[in-house]
Amino acid sequence: MRKIKFIYIVFTLILLSVIQACDMSYLDKDIEDFDTDASLAIAVGNITYTVSELFNEIDAEDIEITENSDGIVSFVYMDTLTSVAASDVIEIPNQSFPSQDFSPALDIPSPGSPIAKIIDLTPSPFIFVLNGSNNEEFNKIVFDGGTLQVKAESTFTDIDINLTITLNSLKSNTDNSSYETTVSLNGTAPEIIDIDLADFWADLTDDGNGGITTNAFVMTVSVSIDLGIGDTITPEQKLSFSLDMTNLQFEAIYGDLKNQTVNSESLTTDFDVFDDFGTGTFLFADPTLQLIIDNSFGFPLGIDFGNIAASNTSETKFLLGAVTDTYQIINSPTLAQEGQTVRNTITIDNTNSNIVDLLALKPSQFTIDISATSNPNSDSAQNFILNTSALSTYVQVNMPLDVVFENTEFEQELDNINGADFEDLGETTLNIHTINTIPLGGSLEMVFYNDNSIVYTITEQVIFAAAPVDTNGISTGATTNTASFDIKGDDIKTATRAVLKLKMNTTNASSNSPVKLLTTNTLDISITTDVSIDINNN
Amino acid sequence: MQKKGTLLISVFIAFTMYNVTAQEYFSFYQLRDYVFQTQSISPTYMPQNTFTIAIPGSNFGVNYQNGFQLKDVLVENTNSGALEIDLGNLLLHVENINTLKTNVTGHLFYMGLRKGKNAFSVFLNTKTDVNVQLTKPFFNFLANGNSSQVGELIDLGHNKFNATAYREIGFGYVRTFLDNKFKVGFNLRFLGGVFHASTQHNAELTLLTKADTYNWEMTAQNATVNTAGLDLIINKDNYPNNALTSYIFGNKNRGIAFDLGASYQLSKKFIIEISTNDIGSITWKEHVINYNIEDGSGTFTGLDLKDIDDVEQAFENELSTIFTTNETQRSFKTKLGVKSYVSTSYLPNKKNRFSLTGFNNYTFNDFSPSFALAYNRTLKRSTFGVTSSFGGHQKPIGFGGNFAVSLGALQIYAATDNIISKVENVYNADFRFGINLNLGYKKWVKEDKPEG
């Protein structure tokens, strides 16, 4: 029995010692983040850019990218410069017509008239001449507002006089009848009539004697003198009439408006096409600047383009050439086209100006100071102006990419980069394979910054090579290129921003030969990568 | 006789010279008739006592085997002393085919009865098997990605996974013939599947990275992962509170399995034994989800980089154009991993036994047998022994031991194939332990001795 117990104890001890022998201390150690040298070779993707898409991608956001009739991709920049309203061109000044008198030349001395009687008289028409501010010859004015004040006075003391006043020139908007009213003068106290002109128009062509004239405002008066017994009249006694027009507003003016000066204020348009481009040549061979002027004034204009300038931060260049030597005529709607707009397009190109030089500045601003004069070629004309008439000017800069890019830099800043986001990015090789039929090559440099300190630079490499061209600057084939960039998360983990620099050169740029970037040209990009996988077990 | 013993010892030493591996429950196997639970791995073992009942909850076994060591993948940094996961180092230590197999067995109830030449048993067990087979190309892909294999076909198809948890209730029967020289036994087991996940047999997945474009040419065939019961855990919020419990204790995932075994005493001093276990299958019908990649092939050429807002979504969309995935609820059948033992023993006298045992696990239909040389000495109320196991896919020899000792009716046994010193060096580990109540011990010992 003792032996059994002994064996039992021995085996128990063996069992316990086996369990105790198992050393698990290896697992007491800290376990570091999982790190691996594994890397994936994978096709990231493919993209094909047309020229239009390529320039859209580089963020020239305020330009429209289109094509011209030759299939050349064009930058088109449009802006509305100004709109000149009718009130900016002409206004009818207040009119204060001198008093005109009518003296009946009656002589009824004391003891006066033995009987009571009515004496009717019809004086000659009164003609009041409107004065424009610029010697305009008005035929007709349709009023939109204003007041006409008619003042009648008498020196016939104690004699009642009844007047019938007819404003022949003032026509009712309702039935074209002339304005007529009656007034009684009792003694020398004047009578004043105020007329709201909003309901009337003025025919200013009647000279009062059956003739045709301009600016004439005709008034006729019928006089009825109510003579009582004993009333006396001397030959000096008279009637006086005066007119005043104030706060005149018009719906339309017709006539010869002569040479009105139309000055738009000096306009500066921010031209941000080149904002993202840095140094280097950017030369357009055949750009045009079109001024599109919509004119609904009823008179032609002559415009002086001598004060158009382009400027960048360091230089200003004025537009010169034939286009600035003479007035450029802006046509207008005829009377039959009243209310319509006539579009005038004035093209400024390399045949009539130095526009190529202006754009070569890579300007950030255009300053356009337009000075215009109405009726530049005619001394007499039948013009009109409506209160809705306007002169609207738009600018359109067409820049067909018939260009020379020589070391032209495009820069784009990528803000708000959080480098820590890339900390897990292991050793990565980015391979960019391109097949390019665009006669434009590009090399890329990328600089990562922590605020203003450079933390990593991806050195410049050609990422797409310019395609060959024929003598017309048109692509004749494709070039292929492969660029590889190495980067890892540790390199940029402290980056807060990055600047991407794309330096572009057109084929044969060094000889200053422009190339045509066609809508059919493409840049095929396929991206592959060898990226190491950095997995954090946290 | 001396020559035969010397021969066995020589073989033992010879195998020790090679880097070979140990395998499944060899030491436990050597306890044979002394411990009734050995019937679970060899149905031919005849208990030496009339009645045995396992102390509930005290009998269990765990087994773990792996093609590489913990220190191969969890490497100590010589500078910091910390551990780091090093897949590159792991790649240096893996073979073309690497398997990881684990088994956890719990004997919830075990009762045995011997009557003359017959023995009967009734048992209730729970078992969990996890078997993973990973190829060297897979590890290479994990460690290096595909960058180092551009232009080469990466065949991921031979990587397999099979995990099953089930319970079994069954009975066993053993009978001796020919004056106890010949024994035949079997276990019949009724299985109730609980959880399962496995890759479908003959699943194929290949990846070829083209050298010039890095395009991925991919093919998939039979790429299905079958699961049962796991959704109750993964998406438990989608089910009522008691759904999991109800499922575990009553579901329609049923199966039958049996074990067969036989032994024959060639002479007074030589015995051969053979057994094949886990012949059977489970049909999974309840809470089944099959995750499928439809057969096909395609090339991933990268994304169309125009107008991409969400790269991850774009990547998903692009892959979905190459492979279509879906989920189905088709029932499926899985075979248990058949395991077999073949053993021959030399008994120079009553107290000593030398044996050579071979084992193979056919879970992935592979044949890479492992072997064990064992010596056991039997005393009046105990037996104990040592084993040296080797073979299988690779790895160094394992030394183990076993014992069973009785104190009155109480029997305690334990066995291991590997006496573990340091966890980081372990390729294989197993351990069996149990406490039984044996009545009528040794009653049959004399009768069992065959005439020599």
Image: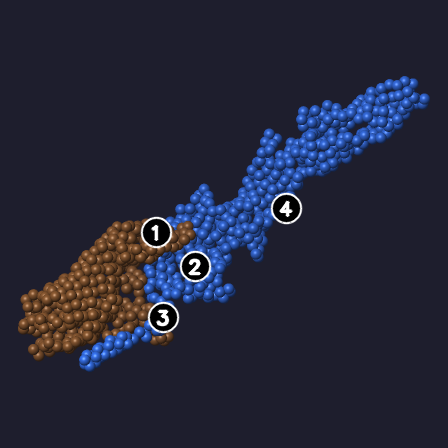
Q: Is residue B147 above or below residue A181?
A: below
Label 4, label 2: how far apart the Cα atoms are: 44 Å
Q: In this image, A177 relative to A335: left or right?
A: right
Q: In this image, A178 relative to B355: left or right?
A: right
Residue A401 shows up from this direction: yes
Q: Residue furthest right?
A: A111
Give the residue type that dot 3 points to. Ile
Of the image marks 4 and 2, the number of the one nearer the N terminus: 4
Disc 2 versus disc 1: nearer the observer: 1
Label 4, label 1: how far apart the Cα atoms are: 58 Å
The foreground one among B216 and B430 is B430
Percent position of residue A265, x then y: 63, 46
Q: Are marks 4 and 3 in contact (CB under 8 Å)?
A: no
Image mark 3: chain: A
The answer as to whether the residues below labels 3 and 2 share one chain is: yes
Q: Which residue is mark 3?
A: A31
The answer as to whether the residues below labels 4 and 3 share one chain is: yes
Give the residue type that dot 4 points to. Glu
**Residue A87 lies in what quarter of the image?**
top right
Label 3, label 2: how far apart the Cα atoms are: 42 Å
Q: Are marks 3 and 1 in contact (CB under 8 Å)?
A: no
Mark 3: few/some/many CA within 10 Å (<14, 14-19, 20+): some
Disc 4 versus disc 3: nearer the observer: 3
Name the mark on residue B318: 1
Percent position of residue A283, x then y: 49, 52
Q: Which residue is mark 4?
A: A265
Q: Which residue is mark 2?
A: A444
Label 4, label 3: how far apart the Cα atoms are: 75 Å
| Residue at image coords 53%, 52% | A272
Disc 3 versus disc 2: nearer the observer: 3
Give the residue type that dot 2 points to. Leu
Residue A434 shows up from this direction: no
